[in-house]
Amino acid sequence: MALSRSKPPRILIVSDGQLGTEAAALLTGLPYELEFAPSREICLAAVVQRPQLVLLDFALESTDPLALCLEIASLATDLPILAISPSGDDITVERAFGAGADDVILPPLRRIMLRQRVGRLIKEVDLASRLREQDRLNHQLFDQNNVLRLVIEPDSGAILDANPAACHFYGYTRDSFRQKRLNDLDAQPTRQMMQRAFRATAARETYFVFTHRLASGEMREIEMYCAPIEYMARRATQVVLHDITQRKQIELRLRESEERYLKILELSNDAVFTLSPDTTITFLSQGFSTLAGAQAEEWLGRSFVPLIYFDDLPQALSMFDKVLHGEVPPPFELRFNSTEGFSYGEVIINPQMDNREVIGIWGAVRDVTKRREAEQSEREQRALAEALRDTAAALNGTLNLDDLLGRILVQVERVVPSDTANVMLIENGFARVVRSRGYAERGLEDDVLELRFDIEATPNMKYMVESGLPFVEPDVDQYEGWVVTGGTSWIRSHVAAPILISGQVIGFLNLDSAMVHAFSDIDADRLMAFADQAATAIRNAELFQAISRQTEELERRVAERTAQLEHERAQLRTILDSMNEGVIYDERFEVRYINRALTELVGYTMREWKGYLEMLRSESTSDGEMRRTLDSLYDTIADGAYWSADLRLRRKDGTEFDASVTCSPVQNAEGVVIGAVTVIRDVSQEKALQAQKQRFVAYASHELRTPITNLKTRLYLMRRQPDHLSDHLEILEEVTDRMKRLVEDMLDVSRFERGVISLQPVILDVQALAQSVATVQTPEAERKGLTLRLDLPPEPTMIYGDPERIVQVITNLVVNAINYTPEGGEVMLAIRPATLRDRFVTIDVKDTGIGIAPEHLQNIFQPFYRVDKRVEGTGLGLSITQQIVELHGGKISVDSEPGVGSTFHVHLPTQSPEEMEPISPMGPANVLQPS
Ligand code: ADP
């Protein structure tokens, strides 16, 4: 029937005409489900589905409404039928009721009326069905076999009925139960109990516990609930019985186990407690005596709060608050006051519940003090290790002592906290602070620098110096030897460690605190580790300073030596660069240096230079020959010996020259050959000079032999023909003169070649000199039937030169012109002044003589060279002339045509004496150099 409340009631409208439609319209909007049945078949099928109400149209045409009504009523007895009668006559209404209709409604149909009637009928149906359901349930409950039920007569206790479950449980049939009374079931039937039971019924006491005996003789603990009921239309008591034997046993066991559990709690180290919501202790296990020195008997009924370490109270109270609100917080840590300060407890707390209500707190505490202490000491050890490691890292990272001591003081602070810290070093028996921390914060920055302790007069320092051990004083007021100075009067406790280097105390690491008992022996031990690091830092710094000094000295020496080498190198380079010989320096066949002269000599720069001498191989030297030469050179040098040879070499421009090549090995300090210096000298000129000298000697001896032969002949003739003495003497004189000239010329040439002729230069007028030569030579010209003419510019033409030598030049040229011009010819001596462009004065000597064939032209300036040997002459004149002109910085050239004549041009520079530096009397250039 529960369904009928949630689902709208279903109304079956049985009609095939107007009335049904009208009724449906009037019910629209109400919470009913309307269903139509226009025929008997549909109607009967729908009735089986159990609607809540049938609206039957008595104006049905398809079937007889009365017969259908009877059919419905017989099919579903409790289904209300509301008949809608088409007419209001009594007979029809009566018939309808007679056919089983529960109500009849007459036209015209009114909304209110219809709705009221329908509503009332449905409610009745609902009530009836609920009553039926209740009945059914009661019955079911009674019969249920898992709940034991008896119905008894309240006054006599006679059992009126028993349900199957009770029959089954007790082992009696229903009928045998009906012959018993309730107290027959009791194992210990006593009058009092029975009376109590009956009294209880009257006094509405409903709950009892008995021990019943079953049919089998077995005893059972039974719990009974009694309630008055109506049974067979008379007053009765229903007894519901529960077999609680097992529960009782469990309860018993539970109680035992609880006692055991409490025992365990007492014995366990964990402390257990229960608190009322206002934190009053309702239970405290034995564990609290070790955790907090609290005895249960002493603390029961007192507040839990004083057991908790003050600093942790806020946390504890907030946790209690959470628990009182039904939360179960995660385990947390609390400190409990103990005789030795405090102990650490790991706490679990839970709400204590009763019927969904928090009635208190229960909790368990595990003593973790030892663990915490171990952790704490582990943390401290780690801090110490880390601080030492960081300092060690700093020691490796820097050698700056000040910086390092500063770092050590910072690291010490991590492990042994203090108000101030300092490092003192001992000098001449006094300790002085070299590095400090924490003084500025106390306004003692200046005082710390003033601190000076006489070790002998300071017992604690003296102790450390003598023992090498740290010193700790938890309360300096208790230490007689404590020396108080201006900057240290605030100190209450002190710890220090000696800084030891090679067994010698060189200083101290000091820590001070304004509080007593700030330091312990452990701190002193730890400080010692830092003092050792300070010692390392100081030793490293000293070593570093020593090394730095050495390095500086070394650097200074290296710099000096480098400068010296640099100087020597520069000198060497200057020498090499100013040398006329080409120089190659190579190391292991790799050319490292060639000097300027080599580049000038061969045309290759250092950059162009490749290999060694291979690139200078001459056309006339084969590859193989060159290789053999170089192999001999390498072998000699490898032996550490000196190699030298004359080679024909080729320049970059293709021209060739004769070279004298010398190669010397370069050895390192161990005497190993590491390279070679090759010097290349151009000996072409020397060779030419050599050849010239040989030629000179040959010519000279030849030229001298002729006059000497003449002299001998003449002397012979003189002895044979004494009468022709004067003739012979004349010829002898002539020959001697010629010889004298020859010898003088030869001497001149040789002097020029040896470069020993000095010029005596002055500013001179070339015209005047030309004039004087012309005056001297005119008679000779005339004697030969020649005209000697002068062509001179109107102004004087000045040059800077040696007048004697210039006269020699002009004379030589004029004499040659006279000598090589046949009679009737003409000799012209012309002077052309310098132009602005060339600044050279020109002396031209022109003749109309025999001229010189082109093939001879290039040789006529060489000594002893003569075109026609039959013509008298030494062949030295032009050679000497050229030397003098060139010595003056001038040039000589010739134009000639055989049979027409020759012109010799002499160009002399017009420099002022200042500009004539190269031929100044003292200068090197006035010495003839082989060019
Ligand atoms: P030499 O004493 O033979 O004149 P030089 O050195 O003065 O010696 O001249 C060398 C040669 O040059 C002469 O032997 C001659 O053959 C030729 N020579 C010099 N001057 C003239 C000239 N003016 N005309 C033709 N030939 C000349």
Image: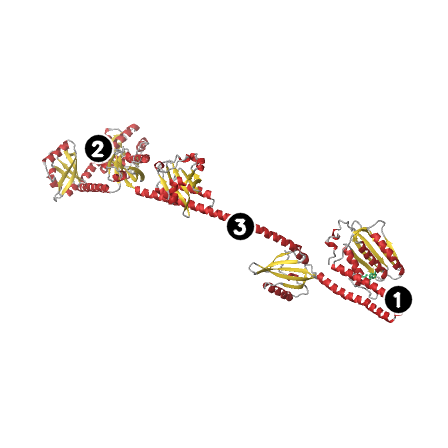
**Residue highlighted by disc 2:** 98
Whether residue 64 is visible, yes or no, is no
Name the element at disc 3: helix
Which residue corresponds to mark 3?
554
Quarter of the image that includes the C terminus: bottom right
**What percent of the width, then of the height, locates residue 115?**
29, 30
Earlier-in-chain disc, 3 versus 1: 3
For the residues bearing labels 1 and 2, Cβ distance under 8 angstroms: no
Which of the two marks, 1 or 2, is nearer to us in this view?
1
Question: Are circles 3 and 1 on residues that touch, CB within 8 Å?
Answer: no
C-alpha gap between disc 2 and disc 3? 144 Å
Give the labeled residue for mark 1.
726
The amino acid marked with disc number 1 is Ser
Q: Regarding mark 2 in the picture, which secondary structure is present there?
A: helix
Q: Quadrant of ligand 1?
A: bottom right
- How far from the left and from the top, in percent, is residue 349? 29, 38
Identify which residue, 230 or 817, lies in the foreground.
817
Q: Nearer the viewer, mark 2 or mark 3?
A: 3
Q: Secondary structure at mark 1?
A: helix
Label 1 near ligand 1 (CB < 8 Å): no
Query: Looking at the picture, which amino acid does disc 2 mark?
Result: Gly
> Which picture quadrant has residue 58?
top left
Relative to the observer, which residue lies in front, 299 or 663?
A: 663
Q: Residue furthest left?
A: 191
Which of the two discs, 3 and 1, sits closer to the camera? 1
x and y percent of residue 65 in the render? 26, 35
Q: CA distance from mark 1 to mark 2?
A: 224 Å
The numbered mark, 1 or 2, whose residue comes first in the sequence reads 2
Amino acid type at circle 3 is Leu
